[in-house]
Amino acid sequence: MELTILILLLPFLSFLILGIGGKWMSHRTAGTIGTLVLGAVAVLSYVTAFQYFTAPRLEDGTFATLMPYNFTWLPFTETLHFDLGILLDPISVMMLIVITTVSLMVHIYSFSYMKGEKGFQRYYAFLSLFTMSMLGLVVATNIFQMYLFWELVGVSSYLLIGFYYTKPEAVAASKKAFIVTRFADLGFLIGILIYGYYGGTFGFTPDTMSLITGGASMLPLALGLMFIGGAGKSAMFPLHIWLPDAMEGPTPVSALIHAATMVVAGVYLVARMFRCLSPMPRTPCILLAG
C-alpha cells in the first residue's frame, strides 16, 4: 500500500513534463509519455485493489479503512485541522479502478484521434492534470482535501473544454462551465465551513462531543449545501446548462469529463458524505460497498 502515493505523483509529474517540455517533443513522444504513465497508474490501482480486497477482513467481516499517508497541514484545534493524505476503503479503491480504466482508454483513443492537432502535447498535459485531480478527490482523507481536488477538477474541465481556444464557441463553453460550477461550489464551500464549525472536524465522521453540544442540528444544512456542489458537477437541474456546451472540447475529453462529473464528483460526494456521515458510519458504508 506504500506505493499508492505514486498513483497521484505519476500523473502530476506527467503534467509537469508535458506542460513544460512538451513544445520540444514530437506528438508521438508526448502521447507515448502520457499513455505509458497512465498505464502505470492503472496497474498500480489494480494492484492496490487486489491487495486491499484480498487482505484479511476485520472481526465483523468488513474491510478495513487504511490511511497509508496522512499529515496535518493547518491545525486549528485538537479536532479541527486541514489534513492531506490517502484514504483507502471499499468506495475509494473501487473508484480508483473506474477512474484509471476510463482515463487510460481515453488516452489510448486520443493517440490516434488527436493526431496532427495543434496543441497535442498540451492536450495530454491537461489529461494528466484532470486524471490526477480525480484520483486525489476519491482518496481524500477529509472533506477539505476533497474540496481542493474538486476545484482542480473544475480547472481541468475549463482547460479541456476550451482546448480549441481559437474558436469563440469553445471559449464561451469553457467559461460557462467554469462559472456555473463555481456558483455550485460556493454552496459546497459554505457547507464545508458550517460542517467544520459545528461538526468539530473536517473528517468524514463528525466529532461526538460537537454533536452532543448542539452541532447535530446544523449538519442537515451543511449536507444540503454540499449537495449543491455535487449537483453542479453532475449537471443536475437547474445547474445543467453547462453540460451540452461541454461538447465543444475534443470528443474524447467529453467522454472523460462526463465520466468524471457524473461518477466521480457527484455520485462519490453523495456516497461519501450522505451514506457515511453518522455517529456509527460503518454500517451504511458496508451496505454501499456490498
Image: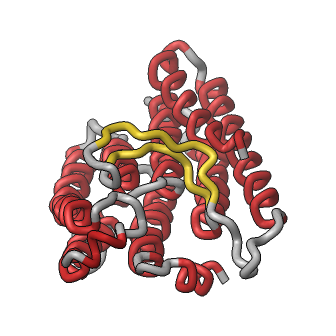
Q: Position of residue 250 (x, y in %)?
A: 44, 50
Say left or right for 152 vs 122: left
Q: Quadrant of the C terminus?
A: bottom right
Establish if 79 lies above or below 61: above
Q: Single out the residue that lies furthest toward the top.
A: 24
Indicate how the structure is coloured in the image: secondary structure
Of 78 and 50, the residue lying toward us: 78
**Residue depicted at 56% across the width and 78% down the height:** 282
**Residue depicted at 50% across the width and 16% down the height:** 21
Say which quarter of the image contains residue 27. Answer: top right
**Residue depicted at 54% across the width and 22% down the height:** 17
Residue 242 visible in the shown view = no
**Residue depicted at 65% across the width and 24% down the height:** 29
Establish if 59 lies above or below 106: below
Q: Position of residue 24 (x, y in %)?
A: 53, 13
Q: Position of residue 162 (x, y in %)?
A: 31, 44
Residue 169 visible in the shown view = yes
| Number of marks in the rendered image | 0
Establish if 34 lies above or below 179: above
Q: Position of residue 52 (x, y in %)?
A: 75, 60
Of 81 and 44, the residue lying toward us: 81
Say left or right for 118 vs 116: left
Establish if 121 lies above or below 208: above
Say left or right for 44 vs 95: right
Of 266 and 68, the residue lying toward us: 68
Say which quarter of the image contains residue 160. Answer: top left
